[in-house]
Image (spheres, rainbow, N blue to C red):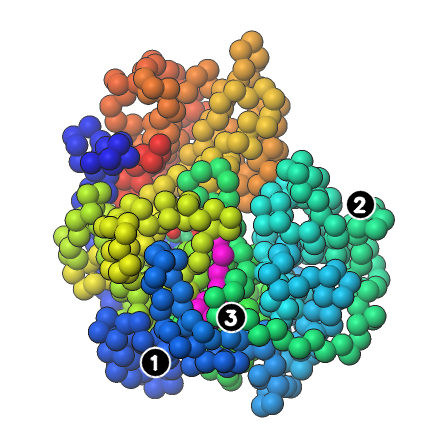
């Protein structure tokens, strides 16, 4: 057993992952006959076509949804594991597949219906024809004004505006690799990603609407460029789209020779047509940064052919998108969900998508349902955190609006069965088929889900592996944890699939180490069977084969469906001069799933105070973004530590969550625990933060937190 495995074991020598998990078996919900009759995947024959017997050739079915410039000769090349290559020999252009090829039949169909946050502003329908024009003109600008060519990287820091997909598709047209950073992230976080990807062009916007306010966004571009410079990297050009053409919404000056308004440059490219660059299937399409076990975010590199085929196939069968549907994925394009299931998958299918700029509950809890009613949305896709918020703020709102959904999706974190039932009964009016899709930034598309017409729903479980994806649960020693055993373990995928990321940008060793080393049976083997993909999530499989995902096994805190690395939060806290040590832990939160609490210790001789707590919060918001703002910052005299000096995060996580903190007698400083406990818990109770009883899974999560140390 490796040292890593040993530390994951608790006092009794039982691995956290082996802890028995008990939950009430939920009832099945069958889809309606009406849904089944119209579904893209309505014939059970599809399950046989994608069974392991037909792997990897089954994925030809997905590849054939695309238009190839030259057809591929090898479905899956495993000669350099785990750097799998899909559809080798094929050439295609992603932008051509998402835009040009629809012009012949559907040029006047809306590709996007964009809904600005202010209700007084008009909705904009952007047809495939208009999208084609806008993408071509911006591609010409990127090529001729910025000098970009295939293989270069460009970073975007854009909000939910049509200019974001336009920018993405313009890059894809040129073979330029885009890297979109979620608009809510800070300038500093963006700058780190600019430098890591080696982007010399940053595309941003002056401002956008969020919760009724026109926020200044361009200011973050200046911070990003400054951070990149500190890291030894120069941003040559900042392209600034303007939320209102001709009006500048930011307070920060434009930097001469570096910053340019896109709306001023574009007239120079009016009518330009840029030939789509035919790219090898294996060419990278984009990078998407995500948090992991260590401080440095990982740039997940996704391919052109495999990725596009995978998101197109899963959009067709799991999102059940038909050309006449009005599809609304309410995620942000700044996350992988938006890349795969707002932009690439739906557009490759020629869908009509709703895109919304702002907060789902602005100006009131009926907004989402008003949009659904007005635009005739019939497929709706969102995350548990939004569902919880809509349920909390407007439990009766859906019944007030005349919309009908045939299909709904939940994604990003486990959904509580109670919340699931509200989504089904109230939001979906008891008619919509729900898919609970489990997957990751790294995986490009869905991994676990029910096929909506063929497999019944079960609240709280994502379902079995998706078509052509064969998951397995292993214990710490690599033994299979059998379905129905009621034991949790590490969920892995036994086989490669076309949507899997190709590598971590610039860090191929970490790619192998983080995702494949743990369960690799033979490093020399060229057989994919020896290289299971380690997802980093705990899971249980019921006797019916459905998986229930329990959450991350590493030190990642999932806030409102977004992965925040504990190390990132801690290093942000340490940018405050007075802070000597910091530890981040998750607390259960009714709306966001998990929230962050920070524990910090000060440098010697300093006094605690509200001001310092605020400084830590501000530092986290500055370095990472508002989404990461801690619920509490606790200044403590010392952290509970092991004899080797490691901070015991599970102990403070237990304190924050009012759970049993277990045996602390092996700590170097056991006395500190009572002291911290008293301080934190009495203050919480004084604030009226009454602890609720955690479910066994939640308690197990708290207990396991930090075990990767
Ligand atoms: C969690 C988001 C339970 C999981 C697409 C995963 C989920 C992490 C689900 C990836 C789900 C995602 N049920 N947990 N349906 N979907 N997760 O990279 O812990 O932002 O590892 O990708 O979110 O988050 P990421």
Q: Secondary structure at mark 3?
A: strand
The CA span between labels 2 and 1 is 52 Å
Whether residue 301 appears in magenta in the rendering, the answer is: yes
Image coordinates for residue 158, horizontal then vertical, percent? 65, 56
Q: Residue at x 38, y 24 (%)?
A: 647
Residue 603 belongs to the span the image colors magenta:
no
Mark toward the viewer: 1 or 3: 3
> How far across and down, in percent of the image, does residue 551 sit?
34, 48
Q: Position of residue 97 (x, y in %)?
A: 55, 78
Where does label 2 land, which residue?
252
Of 341 and 363, nearer the camera is 341
Left or right, 13 with respect to 147, comes to left
Pointer 1: what residue? 41
Find disc 3 in the rendering and name its residue.
280
Query: Horizontally, is 128 left or right of 218 in the view?
Result: left
> Does 287 sit above or below residue 572?
below
Q: Residue at x 17, y 32 (%)?
A: 13
Label 1 neighbour load within 10 Å: few <14, some 14-19, many 20+: some
Q: Which residues are magenta?
A: 300-309
Task: Name the residue: 56% across, 9% down.
Answer: 605
């Amino acid at each position: 057993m490796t040292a890593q495995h040993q530390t994951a074991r608790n006092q009794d020598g039982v691995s956290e992952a082996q802890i028995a998990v008990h939950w009430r078996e939920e009832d099945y919900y069958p889809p309606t006959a009406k849904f089944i009759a119209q579904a893209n995947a309505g014939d059970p024959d599809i399950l046989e076509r994608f069974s392991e017997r037909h792997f990897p050739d089954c994925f030809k079915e997905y590849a054939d949804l695309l238009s190839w410039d030259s057809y591929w000769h090898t479905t899956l090349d495993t000669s350099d594991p785990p750097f799998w290559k899909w559809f080798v020999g094929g050439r295609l252009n992603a932008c051509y597949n998402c835009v040009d090829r629809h012009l012949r039949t559907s040029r006047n169909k809306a590709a996007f219906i964009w809904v600005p946050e202010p209700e007084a502003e008009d909705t904009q329908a952007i047809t495939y024809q208009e999208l084609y024009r806008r993408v071509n003109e911006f591609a010409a600008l990127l090529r001729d004004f910025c000098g970009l060519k295939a293989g270069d990287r460009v970073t975007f820091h854009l909000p939910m505006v049509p200019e974001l997909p336009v920018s993405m598709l313009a890059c894809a047209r040129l073979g330029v690799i885009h890297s979109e950073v979620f608009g809510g992230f800070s300038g500093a976080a963006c700058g780190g990603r600019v430098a890591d990807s080696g982007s010399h062009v940053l595309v941003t916007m002056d401002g956008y609407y969020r919760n009724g306010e026109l926020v200044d966004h361009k200011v973050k571009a200046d911070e990003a460029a400054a951070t990149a410079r500190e890291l030894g990297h120069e941003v040559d050009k900042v392209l600034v789209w303007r939320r209102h053409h001709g009006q500048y919404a930011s307070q920060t000056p434009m930097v001469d020779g570096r910053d340019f308004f896109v709306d001023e440059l574009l007239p120079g490219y009016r009518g330009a047509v840029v030939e789509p660059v035919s790219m090898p299937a294996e060419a990278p399409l984009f990078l998407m940064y995500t948090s992991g076990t260590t401080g440095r975010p990982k740039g997940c590199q996704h391919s052109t052919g495999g990725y596009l085929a995978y998101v197109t196939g899963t959009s067709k069968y799991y999102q059940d998108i038909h050309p006449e549907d009005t599809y609304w994925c309410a995620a942000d394009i700044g996350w992988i969900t938006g890349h795969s299931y707002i932009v690439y998958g739906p557009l490759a299918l020629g869908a009509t998508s709703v895109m919304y700029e702002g907060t789902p509950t602005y100006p009131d809890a009926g907004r989402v349902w008003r949009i659904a009613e007005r635009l005739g949305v019939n497929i709706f896709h969102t995350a548990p955190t939004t569902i919880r918020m809509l349920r909390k703020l407007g439990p009766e709102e859906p019944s007030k609006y005349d919309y009908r959904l045939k299909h709904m999706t939940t994604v990003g974190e486990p959904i509580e069965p109670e919340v699931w039932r509200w989504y089904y009964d109230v939001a979906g009016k008891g008619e919509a088929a729900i898919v609970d899709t489990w997957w990751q930034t790294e995986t490009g598309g869905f991994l676990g889900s029910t096929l909506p017409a063929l497999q019944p729903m079960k609240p709280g479980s994502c379902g079995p592996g998706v078509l052509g994806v064969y998951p397995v649960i292993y214990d710490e020693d690599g033994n299979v944890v059998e379905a129905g055993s009621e034991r949790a373990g590490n969920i892995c995928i036994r086989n490669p699939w076309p949507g899997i990321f190709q590598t971590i940008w610039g860090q191929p060793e970490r790619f192998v180490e983080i995702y494949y080393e743990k369960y690799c049976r033979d490093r020399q083997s060229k057989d994919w069977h020896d290289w299971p993909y380690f997802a980093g999530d705990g899971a249980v499989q019921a006797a019916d084969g459905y998986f229930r995902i329990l959450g991350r096994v590493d030190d990642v805190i999932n806030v409102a469906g977004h992965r925040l690395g504990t190390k990132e939060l801690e290093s942000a806290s340490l940018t405050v001069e007075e802070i000597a040590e910091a530890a981040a832990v998750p607390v259960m939160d009714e709306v966001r799933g998990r929230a962050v609490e920070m524990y910090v210790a000060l440098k010697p001789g300093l006094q605690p105070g509200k001001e310092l707590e605020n400084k830590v919060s501000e530092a986290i918001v500055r370095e990472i973004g508002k989404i990461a703002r801690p619920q509490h910052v606790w200044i403590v005299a010392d952290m509970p530590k092991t004899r080797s000096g490691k901070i015991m995060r599970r102990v403070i996580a237990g304190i924050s969550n009012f759970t049993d903190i277990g045996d602390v007698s092996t700590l170097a400083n056991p006395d500190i625990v009572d002291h911290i406990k008293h301080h934190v818990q009495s203050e919480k109770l004084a604030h009226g933060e009454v602890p609720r009883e955690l479910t066994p899974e939640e308690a197990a999560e708290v207990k396991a937190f930090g075990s990767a140390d």
